[in-house]
Amino acid sequence: MSDNNNKKNRSRALKWDKLDNTANLFPVIVSESVSNVYRISVTLKEEIRPSLLQKALDKILPYFDVFNARMKKGIFWYYFETNNKPAPRILPEDTYPCLYINPYTNNEYLFRVTYHKNRINLEVFHVLTDGNGALLFLKELTYQYLRYRYPALGAELNDTLTADTSLNKEDSYITNYKKSAKKNYKTGHAVIIKGEKLPKDHFGIIHGYIPLSEIKAAAKSYGITINQYLIGTMTWAIYKEYLKEQPCSKPISTCVPVNLRPYFDSSTMKNFFVVVSAVFQPEKETYSHEEVLHIIAESLNKQIQKDNLENLLSYNVSNEKNLVIRAVPRIIKNIAMKQVYKKSARANTSTVTNLGIINVAEEYQDYIDRFHVVLSMSKGQNLKGSVCTYQDLLVFTFSSAIKETAIQKTFFRQLAKDHIHVSIESNGVYYE
């Protein structure tokens, strides 16, 4: 099939779509300082050819309705409309990660693609999809780029997507909603990490490269999972360096997004996650690292159960289902949602998200070196962590809006004490 015929066959009539339940919040709270943009990047084993990357983006974008969209303001809600403008231009990376995406300078698209040496960066406004949906898009972009770079590679897939890529765009929140759900969590105040801020639009990034086998062995030695080990160690580092190992009336509470797709047999490209909180309340003088690990593990084990996850998603959907709320104009809804967000923002210290093990199609594996995930800052959260694993390498990334790095250093030093060999890479902002 020629490119011209493909474009003709894939052309889109103008159509609209609702935002999913989680996405409804993001346009209300977005600003230049709270961008709600995250980054997933893939590093190849050779330098990127930008013309081929642009060609690849132009080719795959029409397949993905979730990305091939612009956002509009309705009377009652925001909504998506097909975007028939040319795909965003591929540009060299020349800013810090996760900055606000201005749709008016981006052909009205809500994502951008940049490159730096061997790395392809996909940055996404969270209104479109979560990390799992974005990862599918990035993988297909990378596959198509590699096919253009090496024409003999995957020739039979020249005009199709790989078999494990879903184009499903159902709102899985609505599909799995149960009417009887009630709120079963509290939103009190948590420890907020404060400090001297980095200059405006500056963003501190530290990547820790960790052998998967070593961190698996360390977590196993404590009788917990890798994710519990990482979140618990970050919690302990905050307790040690920020609270100076002193009791506190407020907990250290970490947001942990949970991908709901495997729990509810969903393949949606839209957002489909809920957030649980890993909570540590420092009530006594001194806690050991191991004590904090087990407190965090217990906190997460209690919450990451299908019944609880179902209740969380259903409670979140119940407000959207409320007939009175649905009839309220969008402008008034926005005011109420901002107030709810401000209150909930005080309930968490940080966020740690884990995309898990990233698998790529076998024929492309030799061309791909590693992946990274970077989270932007949100109100009240000046330090976040993100995790992804490719082959035998786990990458833990700290993103920060403050100059002090004692928490990050203590985190990685504790890993070293647990016989984990870590190599560190920074974007250099701390040395300016």
Image: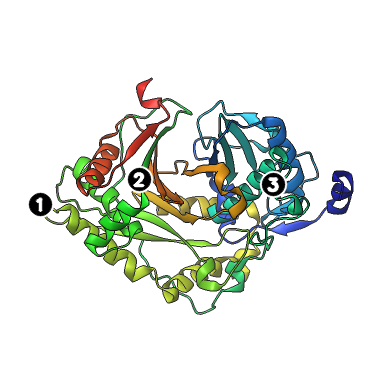
State the scheme by which the image is colored: rainbow
Q: Which residue in the protein does label 3 denote?
A: 153
Name the residue located 57 percent from the left edge and 53 percent from the top edge.
360
Q: Is residue 135 left or right of residue 281?
A: right
Q: Earlier in the sequence, mark 1 or mark 2?
A: 2
Under mark 3, the amino acid is: Leu
Q: CA distance from mark 1 to mark 2?
A: 32 Å
- Disc with the residue nearer the chain's start (2 vs 3): 3
Q: Residue at x 69, y 46 (%)?
A: 153
The answer to which of 42 and 16 lies nearer the viewer is 42
Horizontal and vertical percent position of residue 263: 50, 71
Q: Nearer the viewer, residue 386 or 208?
A: 208
In the rendered image, the residue lying farthest to the front is 152
Count neighbours of disc 3 (C-alpha within 10 A) and say few if under 14, some if 14 to 19, many if 20 or more: some
Amino acid type for the residue under numbered disc 1: Glu
Foreground: disc 2 or disc 3: 3
Q: Are marks 1 and 2 in contact (CB under 8 Å)?
A: no
Residue 63 x %, y % = 75, 53
Q: Name the residue rendered at 26%, 37% in the picture.
A: 409
Q: Disc 1 to disc 3, how far (Cα)? A: 60 Å
Secondary structure under badge 2?
strand
